[in-house]
Image (tube, helix red, strand yellow):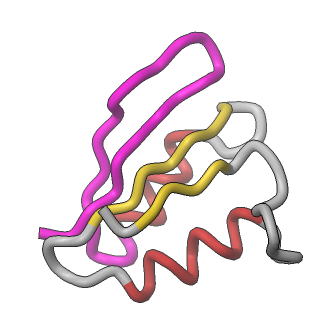
Amino acid sequence: MVEAIDLRGKVEGCGLNPMVKLLEILRDLKPGEAIEVVGEESVAPYSFLEDVARNLGAKITIKEKKGEFYRALIYRE
């Protein structure tokens, strides 16, 4: 696992929007690496993450879902 990112608010210690930070991380993701993503449907829909992962050549799997909350793993094989 490379790192975890929470899309529900600003990235701690970083002025970037969490989605911008996520895109930067995903572009640099190497085969065998993964990132854990925590989010809420109202802020960052899971379907959006599926599209982003697919467009960047990565895969995504949902690990936990409770109401609007989800925890997912985006990875490159």
Residue 64 image-quadrant placement: top left
In the rendered image, residue 42 lying in the magenta stretch gets the answer no
Instruction: Give me the residue at 62% from left, 39% from top.
Output: 39
Give the mark count.
Answer: 0
Instruction: Give me the residue at 50% from left, 53% from top.
Output: 49
**Nearest the eye: 41 or 55:** 41
Q: Quadrant of the N terminus?
A: bottom left
Q: Is residue 64 above or below residue 26?
A: above
Residue stretch in magenta: 55-77
**Nearest the eye: 48 or 21:** 21
Instruction: Give me the residue at 81% from left, 75% from top.
Output: 14
Q: Residue furthest front?
A: 13
In the rendered image, residue 63 lying in the magenta stretch gets the answer yes
Q: Position of residue 23 (x, y in %)?
A: 57, 76
Q: Position of residue 4 (x, y in %)?
A: 50, 56
**Left or right of 59 on screen, residue 26:** right
**Left or right of 22 on screen, residue 9:** right
Q: Residue furthest top?
A: 67
Q: Is residue 67 above or below residue 35?
A: above
Q: Quadrant of the C terminus?
A: bottom left
